[in-house]
Amino acid sequence: MNKVFNICLAIETSCDDTSVALVDGSGFVLGLKSQNQDSVHSPFGGVIPELACRNHTMRILPLIDELFAETKISWSQVDGIAVTSKPGLIGSLLVGVTVAKTLAMLHDLPIVGVNHLEGHLHAPLLSDEKYKPFENFTYPFVGLCVSGGHTSLYSVKAFGKYLLLGRTVDDAAGEAFDKFGKILGLGYPAGAKIDLLAKAGNSKAYSFPKSFMKKDDLQFSFSGLKTAGSLKIKELGSALTETVKADLCASYQEAIAEVLVEKTLRALKKTGLKRAVITGGVSANSRLRELATEEFSKAGVEFLIPPMRYCTDNAAMIGIVGIKRLQRGENDSLTLHPESFMKISELG
Ligand code: KG4
Ligand code: ZN
């Protein structure tokens, strides 16, 4: 008889968020504990891999202890361990994978390595006391994964069956937010700060390039926007008042949101699908959420976007993929090793 997988411990350390979660077989999040390292990396204007790795090492075991204490779940109730094994910063991934393997050995549990992007694509399908996806929302759907490292559109045909429809040929949308914010002096990461400043700004004040909108494919490009943003900031120089900053942020953010929504609409048209998800750190952006909700509703598209806690890197999204894998009888051996890169063909 197949073993029933009721509860999975999940670990995510692919970049600079240390996150652990307990997820049940339906994707319900029993507990999630995350700690970001923004204050560690902010003075450097970007993630310093060695510092990320060291901070994961210091925080991961205490976070797991806190997770078990808060959920009142014991190790004897856990049926398996899921861990992000790719892609990401190799030192960061190594901490999560080593901890997962050690715990699997100690507690005699199966282990499964999860692709970080596959996790993001499933984040909108998680549920908890406060969030539930639409009851009949299921595969197939179009998934836009938009984060600090990725901007990719997928046709998610079924669990484990992904077709890459398009991706960025240069920078990710999150990187475009972060670099622009850095030049504006907003620190790192800057996406959420730009979002906040933009609320007081006029999105029509400045015109920023929306790349590849005339191209008939589903590729993205944000490097031109990044350059235009930095040139505009230099040109404004001492005229950069708080009001001007707010207008700049609103206009820059609008250009990104419009491209992301438009390309997702095109992907829906191309695939004939009527369901979509937008996920990844940038999906926390309030203008993107608003525009997508508006446009997809007009187009009659059923649309899911995860609540904030599941937008940025978190272990719950790794848990839902991990437990599905375990339920299908798939697991990895204790020789599982982290991989910094993934082949494009791997997820699509
Ligand atoms: O998914 P994530 O936590 O990590 C990666 O896998 O990259 O995404 C982090 C990215 C950063 O670039 C951050 O600036 C961006 O998500 N981000 C946002 C917002 N919140 C986070 N970008 C725009 N608006 C936001 N509210
Ligand atoms: Zn991510």
Image (cartoon, grey):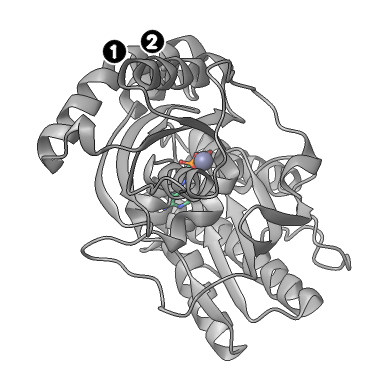
Which amino acid lies under the numbered mark 1 shown in the image of this protein?
Met
Left/right placement of residue 172 relative to residue 136 reads right
In front here: 340 or 174? Answer: 340
In front here: 218 or 45? Answer: 218
Q: Give the residue drawn at x 48%, y 43%.
A: 322
Element under label 2? helix
User: Residue 145 location, x and y as percent?
Assistant: 60, 53
Numbered badge on residue 54: 2
Label 2: how many residues lie within 10 Å, few (<14), some (14-19) or many (20+)?
few
Element under label 1? helix
Label 1: how many residues lie within 10 Å, few (<14), some (14-19) or many (20+)?
few
Q: Give the residue drawn at x 37%, y 60%.
A: 26
Report the Cα–Cα distance between label 1 and label 2: 6 Å
User: Residue 69 location, x and y as percent?
Assistant: 11, 33
Left/right placement of residue 167 relative to residue 57 reads right
Which amino acid lies under the numbered mark 2 shown in the image of this protein?
Arg
Can residue 183 be seen from the camera position used here?
yes
Q: Is residue 45 above or below residue 95?
A: below
Number of numbered callouts drawn: 2
Q: Give the residue drawn at x 49%, y 27%.
A: 15
User: Residue 246 location, x and y as percent?
Assistant: 42, 56
User: Residue 306 location, x and y as percent?
Assistant: 41, 61
Label 2, ligand 1: CB separation under 8 Å? no
- Residue denoted by label 1: 58
Numbered badge on residue 142: none
- Quarter assignment of residue 214: bottom right
Can residue 243 be seen from the camera position used here?
no
Left/right placement of residue 64 relative to residue 196 reads left
Asked if the residue at tag 2 contacts the one at tag 1, i.e. Cβ–Cβ closer than 8 Å, the answer is yes
Left/right placement of residue 85 relative to residue 134 reads right
- Quarter assignment of residue 133: bottom left
